Image (tube, rainbow, N blue to C red):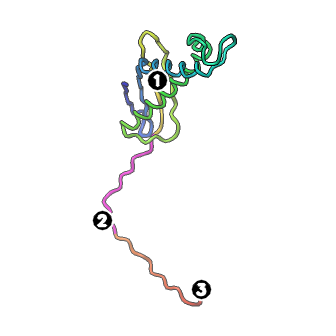
């Protein structure tokens, strides 16, 4: 996974992340084979439909699920690796998909919480107010 972090403003960041498709294709095949065990098609006993038929009917949906999971996981890993504190939901823009490059690439723009630096508080004096409560106040 390749990533590039850009600082757009003091509170806004943009991460460009590239995820290789090879491990994702293995997940897609695994999910399709799991789905073929329970999928019902006319003319086939349950669980006996060919994987090509399952791919034809459910392939795009399974790919979308796997790719969405990969985007979510890679974004979380990138945020954790760069120690960013994300405020709100990211705006994710997918780059045009090129099957020849075998890379899923997207850009996430998001806001981060500001860094608050607390100075030296050892020299600060705080006076505690002393109040007396009489029996009449109670």
**For numbered disc 3, what is the local secondary structure?**
loop
Residue 114 position in % (x across, y down): 42, 45
Q: Dot 3 corresponds to which residue?
A: 138
The relative height of residue 39 versus residue 75 in the rendered view (above or below) is above
For the residues bearing labels 3 and 1, Cβ distance under 8 angstroms: no
- Return the disc, 3 or 2, that comes first in the chain's sequence: 2
- Viewer-proximal residue among 59 and 31: 31
Q: Secondary structure at mark 2?
A: loop
Q: Which residue is mark 2?
A: 122
Range of magenta residues: 112-124
Quadrant (top left/top right/bottom left/bottom right) for the N terminus: top left
Label 1 belongs to which residue?
A: 106
Q: Position of residue 23 (x, y in %)?
A: 42, 21
Q: Answer few, some or many: residues within 10 Å of disc 3's Cα (few below 14, many 20 plus, some between 14 and 19).
A: few
What separation in Å lies between label 3 and label 1 (alpha carbons)? Answer: 65 Å
Which quadrant of the view contains residue 102?
Answer: top left
- Count of numbered marks: 3
| Picture quadrant of residue 124 | bottom left
Where's residue 38, x and y in %? 61, 22
**From what the image shows, is residue 89 above or below residue 129?**
above
Tell me which secondary structure the magenta stretch mostly adopts.
loop
* Left or right relative to 33: residue 130: left
Q: Quadrant of the C terminus?
A: bottom right
Gap between marks 3 and 2, in whole Å? 37 Å
Between 23 and 70, the residue placed more toward the observer is 23
Estimate how packed mark 1 is, as few (under 14), some (14 to 19) or many (20 or more) residues with alpha carbons within 10 Å. some
In percent of the image, x 50 and y 34: which residue is there? 90
Q: Is residue 81 above or below residue 65?
A: below
């Amino acid at each position: 996974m390749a990533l590039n972090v850009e600082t757009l403003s003091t509170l806004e960041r943009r991460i460009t992340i590239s995820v290789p498709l090879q491990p994702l294709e293995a997940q897609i095949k695994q999910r399709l084979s799991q789905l073929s065990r329970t999928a019902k098609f006319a003319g086939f006993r349950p669980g006996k439909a060919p994987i090509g038929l399952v791919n034809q009917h459910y392939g795009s949906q399974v790919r979308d699920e796997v790719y969405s999971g990969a985007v979510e996981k890679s974004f979380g890993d990138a945020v954790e690796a760069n120690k960013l504190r994300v405020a709100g939901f990211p705006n994710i823009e997918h780059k045009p998909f090129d099957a020849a490059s075998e890379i899923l690439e997207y850009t996430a723009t998001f806001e981060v919480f500001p860094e608050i630096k607390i100075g030296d508080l050892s020299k600060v004096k705080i006076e505690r107010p002393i109040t007396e409560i009489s029996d009449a106040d109670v």
